[in-house]
Amino acid sequence: MKTRSKSPPADSEDARRNLHKLPPSASDDDDTDDDEIDNQDSPKTEYASDDENTDDEATDDDLHPSQNENAKGQEKSIQEDSATLDHVGKIRQVPISTTYAEKNDDDSRSYEDSNEDNTPEDEMTTYEQSYLSITENSSMITQTSFNYSESDYYKLGLVRAIGNALPPRHDANQTLRNLEFILKYEPDFEQVHKHWVFNRIVDEDLLERLLKMLQRYNQTSYTVIPFVLKDYAKKQYEFLEGHWLDELDMIHNKTFFTDDWRDNERARYYDIIQDRKNLYVTNQNNARNVAMEWYMRPNSTMPDVDYVLPWDGNCFLTQAAFVKLQHDLIRWNSDPIAAYKRASHGEFLSSTNPKIHSLLKEPIKYFYTPMDRLLVGNEVLLDPNYIPRLDEEPQIIFHRTAVGRFDPTLRYGKKNKVEMLIRLGIKGPWDVYAKNSEDVRDEHISDWIGPPPPAGWVTRLFSGRRRLEKKNKSSKRVKARTDGMTRMLQRLDLDVATKVHGWNSSTFMFYDRGILAKEAEFWVNAQQHNQNGTIPSGDSNSSLYNLIQNLIAHADRALHAGPWSVMDKEPCGCGKHNDCHDFYSVFGHQATSVKKASKLPMCNNDAVRYDRSRLEAFQYNTTILALAYTITRQRSYVEKAAENIVTWFVNPKTQMNPRMGVEWQSGANQSFITKYGVIEFKDVYYFLDALRIVEESGVLSEDQTDSVILWFHEYLDWLLVSKDKESRRGGLGAYFEPNHHGLFHDIQVISVASYIGKLTFAISTIHESISRLLTQVSSKGELRNELGLSNCEHWQAFTLQGWFTLARMARKAGVNLWNKFRSPSDPDLGTTAIQSALCRAAEYTIPLLSHRPICNDNNARRVEDVSRWFLLYLEVQHHCPNAVIRYPSFLWPDWWPLDSFPEAPLGDAFKMKPLYSQGTGIAPFWNLGLYEHDLSMLDNQ
């Protein structure tokens, strides 16, 4: 059997990819130094050389004059290594769902070619001009005629914290390329000890290559802050913190994706919900503090230094920059009052405060180092006539006795270094976008005297994205950064699911493979008992035995049913588009008027006229056959299941087109296809487990398997577009629905994406589905979007069943929906225990728990099959230990039929009803392959 790597046609892939919406940044102005955040997609191949440049279309006019001459002749395209980028198509790129978009060189150009941010580079704000005036005239930067000798130099600890690159913000090879450039070309400065901090590099192979590179250049002083996948797995998305404007579920809000929505507002949402994951992965401020503590802690083995430079990993010091830095340190320390006056534009006044006088007698505690950003290959720095443009966020120098530390709670993109600049009183453009920010403390550090003076300069090496580095592209730069962070987290979420929890495309998403295997083993042993004239002993054993006998009886009947095809309706008409391969049905209350138009008596039967009943029968019976084969290994069952599958998906004469549609009759001769048809394929979640069983049996040929996989590729494409390639309604509309339609859209997407191997996409959708709980479940526990519907008792049970199904699927990938959004229960239910949103919904909605009255809008006060609630009750017993259990008969809801009281205890799943109406969304023989609930019983046989 082939793997699920078979790609859909290019046109359908492109249609889906065009729907991607890339998250912009938290703020177009908050362009903090974001040097090091790496994607673990770093390539294993040799990286491109520095003279290869992505932006060969950019003109020399884009460059600072000093970079212009050096750039000539060096502008070639950087080779993108396709191994560094994964892709999964989806409707939008949000923090948890969506893309890895298929990338090539356009990966960066999508951020670069827009006309936004066209402010000329030579037009600087007042703050930038003020900042440049402090850093001194560029012509003085390369000055070498100083009055100090090397014997006067301060001892420095130069630390670079190296993290992960973030394509498309950075070239994927940036980390390796820039480290080697530093090691190869940065001088061995007098009185400088170099140390390296490798900050949570997510790719172990990349980390090994980086360490070997250090060894090759005789650099032996380094610290590794490890990335631990299990620690990352404990970090959650903060959906509850991300809402505003009275919108709780922003991800599934259609307005969220309109052109009217400001990009930076959407980006703030992404930043907020990614906060904890971002903070763990990037760890920037903690790494800076680790760098300082490495030199500052008392230890006789540590190098003795005067100042520590905890700088970003892509910082490079030329000889001229270093000399200027040392001379500034000496000059300002020799006259600290002049230094502080210089830094404060003459506003600094010496005080009679004894503390100030005491501190003035000590070395200056803090300096800042203005920074230049390269727009071209790094080799430009080898030109002795290179003149930097120092208008970037500076680096900071700390005296070994300084008490200031970076705030480790501020994540990447949350003004993590800006907070220190402001506390030190270093003026710059950041004062504008950080003003009144809740993230920034404005109190000064305890050993602060006044704004620190500048010392030297430093250059940030080339990121590999030339246009993104241009001054007037800060907005695009930050958007690319946010996109890169999203991809990073998507990839790590996938690693958690696959490496920690063992999830893959073969994983059963509803039934439990291991439990089914134990039940099959039980059946084999039971048959041996029967041959010996005995039966399995024990009540639980006999109940399982009876359940399997029931399964086999239904499988025997399924051998003589079907196969089913959408073409069976052809004599009765094929709907609006007259394509009998299309799925065709109508809303139930409109069926009567449609029947009257038919001339054939047979077409008055819904099961003949419409495809809904066929689809349900096909999925139901095929699943029963597959389960029976799993238990008994009787080939006739799986052969019949394969016949059903080939007829529905593969045979060109009988196959269904990979799209759904339900007609709404709006007039005598008018109809249209509605988005609500998506839910007709709701049962695909359990059917795909059956399909896996059939594939693994080897009954299907390789070509047949490939055809089925391709069908589901195309169906997933259809789910994610508003209109398909024939301009018919797609399935995207259901995604934005705030009730059961949106929920079952997620269930389908997760099921199909995991089956065809789009695991990143599936796990992203699992994570983003959590946000739906915020709008679907009230603080009281009501399923508020179902209560207003006709026959609301059905829709409450149906939706809660959907949530429990989604929770079961999510657990397979290591995501626990049962612990999300915990808060106190409703006191009216007799408890104030802390409950998750799902447990609150169960506690309120299940009549056995709340003893609530029938809902007001229930159609004609009709009561659904109340045994549906028993399944839900069983899940609550398993997952909600704080729920108040009300099971005695005297607490039976008074609107339930008296004969509905179950004969068997609700805790014995094997004795509970195995089959329900196909419209309930309950899998056939749901109590087989259940989960760990029954594992202990089977182990003790």
Image (cartoon, rainbow, N blue to C red):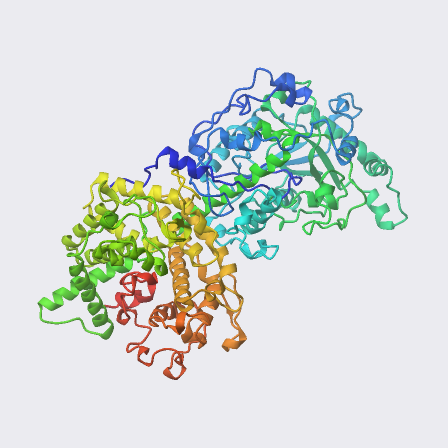
Question: Is 528 placed left or right of 658 in the picture?
Answer: left
**Residue at image coords 9%, 71%:** 533
From this view, report whether residue 776 is shown above or below residue 320: below
User: Which quadrant holds residue 536?
Assistant: bottom left
In the rendered image, is residue 663 in sight? yes
Residue 277 vs residue 163, the one in the foreground = 277
User: Which quadrant holds residue 685?
Assistant: bottom left
Q: Which residue lies furthest to the bottom in this view?
A: 890
Residue 626 pos. (x, y %): 22, 55
Picture quarter with the C terminus: bottom left
Residue 431 pos. (x, y %): 74, 42
Picture quarter with the N terminus: top left
Residue 581 vs residue 259, the one in the foreground = 581
How many numbered discs, if any? 0
Residue 830 vs residue 258, the one in the foreground = 258
From this view, report whether residue 887 is shown above or below residue 735: below
Residue 137 pos. (x, y %): 78, 26
From this view, report whether residue 14 is shown above or below residue 846: above
Q: Residue furthest right?
A: 352
In the rendered image, is residue 502 in sight? no
From this view, report whether residue 448 is shown above or below residue 919: above
Residue 202 pos. (x, y %): 48, 42
